[in-house]
Amino acid sequence: MRIVRTAKAHVNDIVRIGKSHWFYEEWITKKYIENTLNNRGFHFTAFVDGKIAGSIMVVEEDIPKFWIFYFIVDKNYRRTGIGTALLKRVTEKMKKDEFLFVDLAYTDRTGMNFYKNNNFKVMGKVNNWFEKGKSAVIMAKKI
Ligand SMILES: CC(C)(COP(=O)(O)OP(=O)(O)OC[C@H]1O[C@@H](n2cnc3c(N)ncnc32)[C@H](O)[C@@H]1OP(=O)(O)O)[C@@H](O)C(=O)NCCC(=O)NCCS
């Protein structure tokens, strides 16, 4: 596996992999990914055998708060440590005592397990976070 800084040339694959997972979501567009890439933060993409296997986009919203905006590993490559490696690449760039936040659907057991295993703590539940009636769990990791 090779992890590189995300470039514009990676965007189409990043959108494709995200859409194949969140096929019911309308916000995953080339424009959204390109805009996110232009935001200050940490954006990394993982390659396996020359193919894009996953990507993480972390935006610095206000100091010292970082948010995971987009994080996907292609389903053919999951549970092989790529997600953990992408996350590690981001946290290595952050400074001590900074926080990395993520918002998850309240029902997202996979995400919850993944983040707990990577030492994120539950910060709280927020009602109507994504849309009316859809709650979120906010988790964070202190560097
Ligand atoms: C969450 C995601 C990015 C994890 O990527 P990954 O490359 O599969 O993660 P890793 O292989 O590094 O997994 C690390 C650990 O997290 C936990 N984990 C990961 N996927 C899990 C699952 N489906 N069920 C339970 N635990 C899981 C496990 O403890 C795993 O270690 P193990 O395989 O040794 O048991 C990936 O599952 C994914 O893209 N999911 C769909 C999109 C998504 O949920 N994105 C994050 C929400 S913002």
Image (tube, helix red, strand yellow):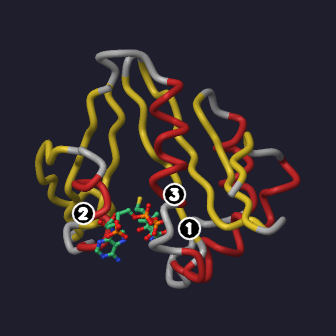
Circle 3 packing at 10 Å, graded few (<14), some (14-19), many (20+), is: some
User: Which quarter of the rendering shows the C terminus?
Assistant: top left
The amino acid marked with disc number 3 is Phe
Ligand 1 has an atom within 8 Å of the beta carbon of the residue at disc 2: no
Q: Position of residue 15 (x, y in %)?
A: 70, 67
The amino acid marked with disc number 1 is Val
What residue is pinned by disc 3?
A: 71
The amino acid marked with disc number 2 is Met
* Dot 3: element: strand
What residue is pinned by disc 2?
A: 112
Q: Determine whether label 3 and label 1 are within 8 Å by CB.
A: yes
User: Which quarter of the rendering shows the N terminus?
Assistant: bottom right
**Which quadrant of the figure shows ligand 1?**
bottom left
For the residues labelled 2 and 1, the Cα–Cα distance comes to 15 Å
Q: Determine whether label 2 and label 1 are within 8 Å by CB.
A: no
Query: What residue is rendered at 23% in x and 46% in y?
Result: 139
**Quadrant of the rendered image containing residue 6:** top right
Q: Determine whether label 3 and label 2 are within 8 Å by CB.
A: no
Q: Position of residue 48 (x, y in %)?
A: 73, 65
Which numbered disc, 3 or 1, marks the residue closer to the eye? 1
What residue is pinned by disc 1?
A: 73
Total number of numbered discs in the rendering:
3
**Quadrant of the rendered image containing residue 76:** bottom right
Ligand 1 has an atom within 8 Å of the beta carbon of the residue at disc 3: yes
